[in-house]
């Protein structure tokens, strides 16, 4: 049976599922899918354990103990929906509809389930959530240069002479990219990986550039300096398809490799050598990860990287170019799902999800958030500044309902918990932000217990509240048909019936796909090396680099917390998903912090010691992993463990800040300063 991986990963893998006696038995990658090619990650290979987890919520629950204690009693669906409707009506009457706050993200990337709550909350006039936690900063920077969140088809990298994986640990977070990389290398491609630590991906590279965190933009500027100074640019492409080459050329004269070398922590000769290698051929493909955008300067970094293929003409090469995300390639009309027409005039306020803790605890917020509805997310683990988030969730006057598959950290703070289906138990349509295929997944097993999908539950709430009822009366299949029919030419030829028959269909886009070969959908119609729109917003119109707001040059704070700390994904979790799995937790081991031997020695820390990592926000306990995989001055903490599986009950996001980046309102999750010390005697280092 066919299915699709629903998780927040670029690959959106096509899955083959076997079912035995009504239970998921095995999950493998579809061999014939052009992108999946039969390869899936170890997380999803064990998906049967998630579907049938002992932590699955199988019936609606009402809290009977303190918030956070996880003590509940079962109730019926009608009683649960009736109580939510009653409480919301009372809150709206007392405080106004903006006192309601939905909170969701990419727990399911199926498009119908992802957007299922938008029409209801729009019709109610609830506060709107700015869903910025993952891609907002990167996309804002990318759009400033090329106008759309797309890029050259990643399948085309197989024919490249040079592949650059910039800020992406594909071996963990986009495993199918590694399949393409291996095929490219078999044909002679040279692989460069740029990452602040030696990831499993970097271990496979021909060259690894271990830059300091938050300095990727400076490296790109030095590359531009070399490319332009040595005439390694495509003047025909620049004249035909770009805007602002002359001011850019003048601007980057000051960004010499000699100036940039101490910023990025690389020898000048290495920077020059890499720039020359990149400029030697337009048949260079750069795959860029989202993680490098999660710095204070992350938007400008992505904007700067998007300029590089324009200088060499790689955007116009069938095996060159760059890709941050293919998410904008599919021309769906999302008003079908979001229904902005249901919003009041003027629209309700917007609350940034990154700053949930502030929204729940700010006494000056008017009206105060009195009701929180969480679905497809686990804010009690994934949001930064966790001390503030948990303080807000613990409010006795906050009515919280959580619709969830398993008993997450967030669900333990809920007044009502509703059982949710997994992707194996409901129907949905999927796009990808790593490839160009649209896919349909139909249920392969019946819902576990009394689990219901987002679409079903919001339909029940709409009927109970008497709003947006007409939107939810349609079956999911009808909604998918309308979404396809109202899209642009890239999706209009894809029918629901064809998806049911084939499972996966490529967008109706050219082969090779080179969206910026002759320009870009920017205000000027060109790839904007100079951006007037940024200037109008008070931002630098030319690519540049600025030091981190919380980095090694920030004075007294850097003296107290002298180590930069980045928080990338680990192998067996995806954000906080899969932390519920006993099997995958055993494989992952225990929460660790990597630190360089020199940093460990000066602190009297040995490999395997229990250590305390402290930032200006809080402290958490980890097991030290002393390794030369990271450079002196940089600590690395991979993955998000649920608090109750973390030593001391305080996960990594007790360290991170909720300030936002330079563009898009995203989080600066990787711009952290910390100190690491031996943990107090008796502190546990076991998960």
Image (cartoon, rainbow, N blue to C red):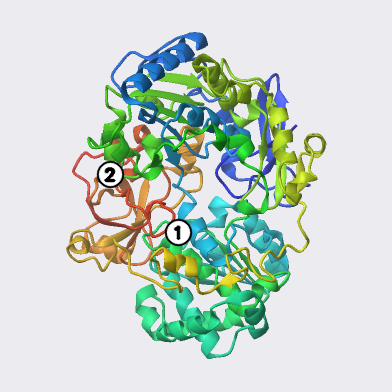
Above or below, comparing residue 586 to residue 661 in the picture:
above
Is residue 467 found left or right of 668 in the rendered image?
right
Structural crowding at the residue carrying mark 2, measured as other residues with C-alpha within 10 Å and reported as few (<14), some (14–19) or many (≥20): many
**Could you tell me which residue is drawn at 56 percent across and 15 percent down?**
450
Structural crowding at the residue carrying mark 1, measured as other residues with C-alpha within 10 Å and reported as few (<14), some (14–19) or many (≥20): many
User: Quadrant of the image for the C terminus?
Assistant: top left
**Could you tell me which residue is drawn at 46 percent across and 38 percent down?**
586
Above or below, comparing residue 131 to residue 517 in the picture:
above
Give whichever of 89, 385 is nearer the camera: 89
Q: Position of residue 250 (x, y in %)?
A: 46, 86
Which residue does the numbered mark 1 point to in the structure image?
Answer: 293
Q: Position of residue 217 (x, y in %)?
A: 44, 70
**Could you tell me which residue is drawn at 41 percent across and 52 percent down?**
665
Whether residue 641 appears in this view of the structure is: no
Total count of labels: 2
**Could you tell me which residue is drawn at 35 percent across and 19 percent down?**
93
Which residue does the numbered mark 2 point to in the structure image?
Answer: 620
User: Quadrant of the image for the N terminus?
Assistant: top right
Q: Nearer the viewer, mark 2 or mark 1?
A: 1
- Which quadrant of the structure image shows residue 627? bottom left
Above or below, comparing residue 108 to residue 655 in the picture:
above
Mark 2 to mark 1 CA distance (whole Å): 24 Å
Q: Element under label 1?
A: helix
């Amino acid at each position: 049976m066919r299915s699709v991986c629903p998780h927040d990963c670029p690959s959106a893998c096509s899955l083959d599922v076997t079912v035995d006696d009504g239970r998921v038995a095995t999950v493998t990658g579809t061999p014939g899918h052009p992108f999946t090619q039969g390869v899936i990650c170890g997380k999803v290979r064990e998906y049967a354990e998630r579907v049938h987890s002992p932590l699955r919520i199988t019936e609606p629950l009402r809290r009977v103990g303190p918030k956070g204690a996880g003590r509940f009693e079962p109730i019926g669906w009608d009683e649960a929906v009736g109580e939510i409707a009653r409480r919301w009506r009372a809150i709206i009457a007392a405080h106004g509809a903006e006192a309601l706050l939905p909170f969701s993200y990419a727990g399911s990337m199926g498009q119908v389930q992802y957007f299922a709550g938008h029409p209801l909350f729009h019709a109610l006039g609830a506060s709107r959530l700015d869903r910025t936690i993952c891609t907002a900063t990167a996309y804002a920077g990318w759009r400033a240069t090329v106008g759309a969140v797309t890029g050259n088809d990643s399948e085309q990298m197989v024919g490249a002479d040079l592949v650059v994986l910039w800020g992406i640990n594909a071996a963990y977070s986009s495993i199918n990219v590694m399949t393409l990389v291996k095929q490219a290398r078999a044909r002679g491609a040279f692989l460069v990986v740029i990452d602040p630590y030696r990831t499993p991906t970097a271990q496979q590279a021909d060259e690894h550039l271990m830059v300091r965190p938050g300095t990727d933009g400076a490296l790109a500027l030095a590359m531009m300096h070399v490319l332009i100074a040595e005439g390694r640019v495509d003047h025909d492409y620049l004249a035909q398809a770009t805007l602002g080459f002359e001011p850019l050329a003048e601007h980057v004269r000051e960004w010499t490799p000699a100036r940039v070398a101490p910023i990025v922590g690389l020898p000048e000769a290495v920077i020059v050598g890499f720039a020359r290698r990149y400029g030697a051929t337009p048949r260079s493909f750069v795959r860029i990860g989202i993680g490098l955008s999660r710095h204070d300067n992350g938007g400008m970094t992505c904007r700067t990287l998007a300029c590089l293929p324009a200088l060499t003409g790689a955007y116009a090469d069938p095996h060159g170019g760059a890709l941050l995300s293919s998410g904008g390639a599919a021309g769906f009309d999302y008003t079908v799902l979001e229904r902005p027409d249901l919003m009041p005039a003027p629209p309700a306020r917007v609350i940034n999800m990154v700053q949930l803790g502030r929204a729940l605890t700010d006494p000056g917020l008017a009206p105060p958030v009195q009701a929180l509805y969480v679905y497809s997310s686990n804010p009690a683990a994934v949001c930064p500044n966790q001390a503030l988030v948990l303080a807000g969730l613990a409010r006795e006057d906050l009515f919280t309902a959580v619709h969830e598959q398993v008993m997450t950290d967030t669900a333990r703070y809920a007044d009502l918990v509703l059982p949710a289906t997994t992707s194996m138990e409901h129907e949905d349509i999927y796009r990808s932000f790593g490839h160009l295929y649209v896919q349909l997944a139909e249920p392969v097993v019946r819902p576990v217990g009394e689990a219901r999908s987002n679409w079903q539950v919001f339909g029940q709430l709409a009927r109970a509240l008497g709003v947006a009822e007409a939107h939810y009366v349609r079956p999911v299949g009808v909604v998918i048909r309308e979404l396809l029919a109202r899209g642009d030419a890239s999706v209009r030829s894809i029918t629901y019936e064809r998806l049911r028959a084939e499972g996966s269909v490529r967008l109706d886009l050219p082969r090779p796909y080179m969206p910026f070969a002759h320009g870009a959908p920017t205000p000027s119609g060109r790839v904007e090396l100079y951006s007037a729109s940024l200037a109008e917003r008070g931002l630098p119109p030319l690519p540049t680099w600025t030091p981190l707001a919380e980095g090694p040059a920030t004075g007294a704070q850097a003296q107290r917390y002298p180590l930069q700390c980045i928080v990338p994904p680990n192998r067996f979790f995806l954000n906080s998903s899969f932390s519920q799995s006993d099997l995958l937790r055993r494989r992952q081991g225990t929460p660790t912090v990597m630190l360089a031997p020199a940093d460990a020695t000066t602190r009297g820390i040995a490999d395997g010691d229990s250590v305390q990592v402290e930032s200006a926000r809080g402290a958490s306990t980890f097991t030290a992993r002393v390794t030369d995989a990271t450079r002196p001055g940089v600590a690395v903490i991979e993955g998000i463990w649920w608090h109750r599986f973390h030593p001391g009950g305080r996960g990594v996001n007790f360290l991170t800040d909720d300030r936002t980046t330079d563009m898009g309102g995203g989080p600066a999750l990787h711009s952290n300063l910390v100190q690491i010390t031996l943990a107090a005697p008796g502190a546990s280092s076991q998960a």
